[in-house]
Image: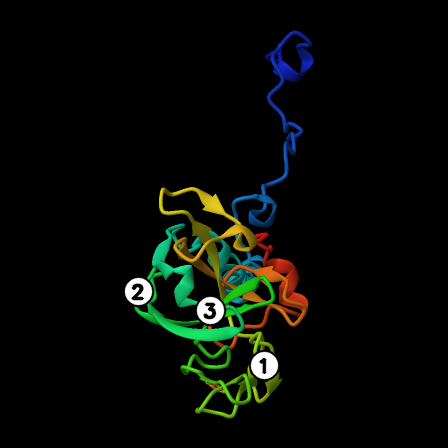
């Protein structure tokens, strides 16, 4: 009697070939968000370079525009003497120590027609000291031919703006503020911080030599309201 074959036994466990489950496909490196391809690497380098170049241009421009507004001169007053030392109808030259960070400076006190204007002798071109000519009632710069009228407005040469001015106030001997029209000879003239003006004599935060207060950059510099 032949031996019973397992194939004939429907209850025997299957031992033939089996279907293989393909499962999930092998992950590709390109699909890994943390994987940096050469193209992506070069793109990052180009982006970083663009950001650096933009910062190199923008940061100095913003700093140049903002710095003058962030570093105003300290609000101090310097007593330059009694009002009788500055006769009406004349422009008087005096030396003033301070109050700005710039050391000693020469200031021309222009007093005319109930108006007093302290004018700084620093040329608005490159900073040479200007001289006052009483005969022509003008200011002249010896360095590059800059010329200004009696109010310090540019009449010739390379200066980009008028001569800078300084705040002033007049106080009585006991320290009370008094208007120029009501002041007496013994009242004292005090000189304050310097500021720049444009050709319309509107005031702006003090600029350095060669800097303009007009044009596109004008909008970047707020007026101090002086
Ligand atoms: S510094 Fe005065 S004109 Fe140049």
Q: Is residue 18 left or right of residue 196?
A: right
Looking at marks 2 and 3 on the same chain, the residue that comes earlier in the sequence is marked by: 3
Instruction: Check residue 87 in the rendering and tell me which mark sits there, or answer none.
Output: 3
Looking at marks 1 and 2 on the same chain, the residue that comes earlier in the sequence is marked by: 2
Q: Residue at the location (59% across, 59% down)?
A: 221
**SS class of the residue under badge 2?**
loop
Comparing marks 3 and 1, which lies closer to the viewer?
3
Q: Is residue 187 left or right of residue 47?
A: left
Instruction: Check residue 149 in the rendering and tell me which mark sits there, or answer none.
Output: 1
Q: Residue at the location (31% across, 69% down)?
A: 104
**SS class of the residue under badge 3?**
loop
**SS class of the residue under badge 1?**
loop
Judging depth in this view, the residue of 124 and 120 nearest the camera is 120
Rendered position, 41 above or below 134? above
Asked if disc 3 is less than 8 Å from ligand 1, the answer is no
User: Quadrant of residue 152 in the image?
Assistant: bottom right
Quadrant assignment for the C terminus: bottom right
Judging depth in this view, the residue of 193 and 63 nearest the camera is 193
Q: CA distance from mark 3 to mark 1?
A: 19 Å
Rendered position, 8 above or below 28? above
The spot of residue 3 in percent (x, y) is: 59, 12
Q: CB atoms at circles 3 and 1 under 8 Å apart? A: no
């Amino acid at each position: 009697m032949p031996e019973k074959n397992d194939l004939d036994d429907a209850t025997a466990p299957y031992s033939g070939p089996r279907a293989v489950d393909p499962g999930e496909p092998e992950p590709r490196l390109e699909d890994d968000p943390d994987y940096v391809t050469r193209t992506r690497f070069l793109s990052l380098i180009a982006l970083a370079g663009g950001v650096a170049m933009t910062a190199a241009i923008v940061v100095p421009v913003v700093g140049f525009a903002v710095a003058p507004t962030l570093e105003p001169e300290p609000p101090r007053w310097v007593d330059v003497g009694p009002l009788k030392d500055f006769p009406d109808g004349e422009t008087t030259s005096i030396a003033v120590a301070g109050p700005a960070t710039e050391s000693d400076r020469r200031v021309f006190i222009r007093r005319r027609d109930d108006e007093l204007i302290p004018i700084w002798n620093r040329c608005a071109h490159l900073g040479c000291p200007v001289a006052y000519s009483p005969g022509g009632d003008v200011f002249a710069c010896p360095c590059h031919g800059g010329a200004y009228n009696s109010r310090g407005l540019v009449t010739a040469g390379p200066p980009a703006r008028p001569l800078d001015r300084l705040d002033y106030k007049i106080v009585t001997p006991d320290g009370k503020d008094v208007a120029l029209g009501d002041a007496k000879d013994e009242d004292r003239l005090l000189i304050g911080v310097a500021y720049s003006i444009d050709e319309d004599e509107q005031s702006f935060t003090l600029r350095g030599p060669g800097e303009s207060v007009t044009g596109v950059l004008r909008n970047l510099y707020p007026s101090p309201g002086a």
